[in-house]
Amino acid sequence: MDQHNKWVIILVILLSCEWLSAQGPPILGDKPIMLGGKSVIIKTLTEVRNTNEGTFVKAPLMVHYLPTSNTLVSVHVPFTNYKFNNGLEGSGLGDIEIMAKYQFFRKDKMGKTFRIVAKTLQTLPTGKDLRLEGIQTKQYQSYLGVVAGYETIKYGISNELGYNIGFDEDYNEFRHKLSFGLPLLKPTYPVNQINLYFEYQNSWFPETNNFAILYGQGIQYAKGRFTIEMAVQAPLIQNLAEEKERKYSLFFGSRYVF
């Protein structure tokens, strides 16, 4: 192989990895693809959740920082609004979350990549005690998980498995998320892509023996460093306390990479 062809192949691989990483993570899940070191991502993903006991909104401001290309730390500061059917309503600060990820496996080939990260998410009891899982509980919680992902320029698959430990054992949860991403446009650089996402979440709460299987359908548009996205999530099967049963959740958000 002559020197010219060698550098052409290297350039194609690098651009392919850039296309993959710029498609954006699953809307409702996570993926192990990380950007370059010293990158900063400002993002938000607002959830409007409708359940048998009321309507609740979580609008977090999320700041992600990558010290290196295989490590990430972030803080999520949520504003929440709640309106229970019994007349209780209000707004304020929800439970702040601190996340860290470490990518310990990476294998790249031309136009495709497979990666695995270890992940931890610490939930701080800064919100009111509303017993709204994932929104406002006033309970310290610690989540540990592993995220594996395989992506090509034609599709992406992300799989996450973890366990959440709550100070109140009712929040102990085995959590599994599976996401499929389908780019609709041909890869270009700079990025100009529309992605469809098909996402599943399985949650089992061993202390109460409750469980839920949720399905989310989303669409994402990535243009250069900016991404906007929206999704709807609804239960396929759920065995929860009647007042906690979900009807649907709407998600919409954006992110910008510095």
Image: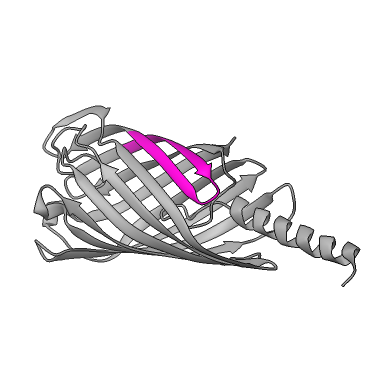
Q: Position of residue 88 (x, y in %)?
A: 13, 32
Residue at left offset 53%, top offset 39%: 255
Closest to the observer: 24 or 110?
110
Give the vertical position of 91 relative to 249 (above or below). above
Q: Nearer the viewer, residue 157 or 90?
A: 157
Instruction: Look at the magenta stretch and give its main secondary structure.
Output: strand
Residue 150 drawn at (x, y percent) = 53, 68
Quadrant (top left/top right/bottom left/bottom right) for the N terminus? bottom right
Residue 154 visible in the current orientation: no
Task: Name the one closer to the observer, 15 or 155.
Answer: 15
Residue 63 is inside the magenta segment: yes
Question: Is residue 19 toward the left or the right of residue 80 in the image?
Answer: right
Which residue lies at the image location 15% right of the left edge and 41% below the top edge?
139
Residue 26 relative to residue 234: left or right? right
Left or right, 83 with reference to 86 = right
Color theme of the render? one colour
Q: Where is residue 211 in the image (x, y as percent from the top left)?
A: 20, 65
As displayed, is residue 84 above or below residue 35? above
Residue located 45% across and 65% down the image: 148
Whether residue 145 is visible, yes or no, is yes
Q: Which quadrant would the C terminus be assigned to in this image?
A: top right
The front one of 207 and 198 is: 207
Residue 155 % position (x, y): 59, 67
**Residue at position x 23%, y 37% from top?**
124
Q: How many labels does the image show?
A: 0
Q: Quadrant of residue 128?
A: top left
User: In the image as oriented, which residue stretches furthest toward the bottom?
Assistant: 1
Q: Bounds of the magenta span? A: 58-77
User: Would you say residue 68 sits in the magenta stretch?
Assistant: yes
Establish if 180 lies above or below 140.
Answer: below
